[in-house]
């Protein structure tokens, strides 16, 4: 009797350990977890999470991540397109067609050149999922300089201050603003960081400055033309002075737009009588 009880306890302990092991496995490998699928249901694109946190990322590096993509529908899932919100981020799927219950891997790579502080990018997956034809995944992280990039003056060493205007980054920071001025140019070249209305995003608001002072206009113009000395995320845009993408007239038009936008934002609101 005692021997039978001991064997039962051992078997129970083994069962508990096995179940705990499976739970941990499914937590770290979600695609291995069993899923009940209705064979008659439409295709359904799913991921374990809609946010990929890259954590602390070194500046001037290429960092990557992978995320499983699954079809939890009963019909064939066809992925039409994978796109990203910025040219610095590349996303590729191993397979574009998934059978019911099948999974594939999304590979993401980000170029952190001239980036500093919090970052947020979006990956959009377009498919024949009728409920969610566009599935969006958020990519976040915090870019920090390495010790080699720090200097005693506070400035950061970067390999190329014009990197944002080249390669895949050019599609976001140059191409959209070609031939534009004022508000259109701001939305195209600056809105991604400062917000399309200038009220701030991953970069600070530009509308809280003392725009009525001439020195403010000169300061902002200088930052746009020559970049921010202490922050490589703001590169020099002047074509004449540094080989950037903007003419002097385009830079002036940005300053004029921001001054006007600030005057509207800072104007006291009228109290109705």
Image: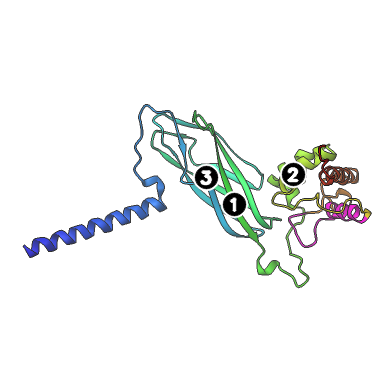
Q: Is residue 233 left or right of residue 54?
A: right
Q: Which mark is residue 50?
A: 3
Instruction: Judge by depth and name the residue closer to the eye, 45 or 203.
Output: 203
Mark sitting earlier along the chain (1/2): 1
Q: Which mark is residue 140?
A: 1
Mark sitting earlier along the chain (3/1): 3
Badge 3 marks a residue whose secondary structure is: loop
Q: Which residue is drawn at 26% across and 57% down?
A: 16
Q: Residue at x 43, y 30 (%)?
A: 76
Which residue, as the protein is rendered here, is positioned at the far right? 214
Q: In this view, does 126 lie to the left or right of 187?
A: left
**The magenta segment:** 215-234
- At which x and y percent is residue 132? 52, 33
Tell me if residue 261 can be seen.
yes
Which residue is under mark 2? 191
Tell me if residue 174 can be seen.
no
Q: Is residue 56 left or right of residue 240?
A: left
- At which x and y percent is residue 135? 54, 37
Query: Counting other residues with Cα less than 10 Å from the Cα at mark 3, is it few (<14), some (14-19), or many (20 or more)?
Result: some
- At which x and y percent is residue 142? 62, 58
Q: Distance between the Cα atoms at labels 2 and 3?
A: 24 Å
- At which x and y percent is residue 220? 86, 53
């Amino acid at each position: 009797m005692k021997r039978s009880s001991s064997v039962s306890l051992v078997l129970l302990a083994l069962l508990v350990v096995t179940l705990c092991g499976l739970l941990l496995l499914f937590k770290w490998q979600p695609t291995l977890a069993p899923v009940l699928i209705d064979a008659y249901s439409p295709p359904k694109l799913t991921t374990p999470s809609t946010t990929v946190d890259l954590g602390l990322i070194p500046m001037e590096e290429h960092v990557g991540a992978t995320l499983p993509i699954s079809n939890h529908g009963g019909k064939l899932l066809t992925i039409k397109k994978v796109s990203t919100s910025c040219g610095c981020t590349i996303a590729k799927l191993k397979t574009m067609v998934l059978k019911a219950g099948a999974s594939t891997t999304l590979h993401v790579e980000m170029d952190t050149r001239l980036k500093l502080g919090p970052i947020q990018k979006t990956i959009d997956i377009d498919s024949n999922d009728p409920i969610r034809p566009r599935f969006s995944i958020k990519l976040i992280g915090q870019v920090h300089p390495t010790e080699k990039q720090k200097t005693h003056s506070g400035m950061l060493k970067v390999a190329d201050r014009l990197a944002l205007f080249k390669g895949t980054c050019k599609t976001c920071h140059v191409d959209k603003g070609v031939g534009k001025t004022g508000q259109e140019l701001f939305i195209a070249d600056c809105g991604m960081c400062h917000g399309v209305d200038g009220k701030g995003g991953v970069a600070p608001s530009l509308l809280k400055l003392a725009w009525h002072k001439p020195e403010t206009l000169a300061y902002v113009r200088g930052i746009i033309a020559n970049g921010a000395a202490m922050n490589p995320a703001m590169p020099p845009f002047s074509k004449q002075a540094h080989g950037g993408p903007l003419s002097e007239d385009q830079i002036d038009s940005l300053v004029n737009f921001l001054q006007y936008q600030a005057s509207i934002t800072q104007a006291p609101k009228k109290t109705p009588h």
